[in-house]
Image (spheres, rainbow, N blue to C red):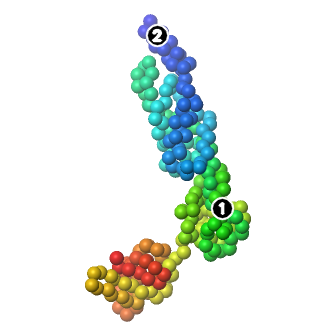
Amino acid sequence: MKLTSLILLLIVEMAWGVDQADVGDALKRAIAKSLPEQAIIQVRHIYLPNFVTACAHPQLLNAQLPVGRVSFECEGKGRSGRYQAAGTADVLVEAPIAVASRVIQHGEALGPNNIALEIRSLGPHILSGFFASWESITGRRAKGVVAKGAVIGISQSEVPKLVQQGQMVEMIYDRPNLMISARMKALQSGEENQWIRVENARSHKTLMARVVAPSTVSLR
């Protein structure tokens, strides 16, 4: 009798299922936290085990941007008690990202004169990367020739180096009531605030210094 009741209870819980619209809305809210405000999110093909009758507070398990097939887990309470369940869903996201508004030549500064933020599907650009705001692309330059209409990926842009390897730079050491400067040779190229190795041309002593301006490094 007890076994029959347990089987009937399981069948009832399986028949109840879970409201997929509610799960989809909860997933959208969780996904939106890692995306631009203007992102358009669609959640499809939600899969959860049949015994799940509620899915509260779904937690995304994907370490990277939640696009494509994503995994999540949630908790609920059924007639058999509390449970944790894992599920999957297909997520489509469209958002404004940086696109070349014309052909961009190598070394050109990226900005409003050659870049537009256009709504694109993010899925095809997860591996190559993208820029979703003006702030994220400001100060970068084109790396190679970029075709009109192309999404600007991480490999197609770079932050200009303020110091080039082999260049003679001024190294400064600035403290209250004391400033020392010396000519050094850069052993590495560096961007602003990047620490690089520099060498004293006379003693050949090597130090680590921070790039602070074009052709200038600091010991602090």
Q: Residue at x 66, y 52 (%)?
A: 120
Quadrant holding the C terminus: bottom left
Q: Which mark is residue 5?
A: 2
Residue 51 showing in the rendered view: yes
Crowdedness near tag 2: few (<14), some (14–19) or many (≥20) residues, C-alpha within 10 Å = few
At mark 2, the secondary structure is helix
Residue 207: x, y in percent?
Answer: 36, 81
View extreme (left): residue: 177
In the image: residue 178, left or right of residue 169: left
Residue plotted at (43% across, 24% down): 77
Quarter of image, res 153 = bottom right
Q: Which residue is mark 1?
A: 116
Of 191 and 9, which appears nearest the observer? 191
The amino acid at mark 1 is Ala
Q: Residue 111: image x %, image y %?
A: 61, 68
Q: Earlier in the sequence, mark 1 or mark 2?
A: 2
Per the model, the C-alpha gap separating discs 1 and 2 is: 63 Å
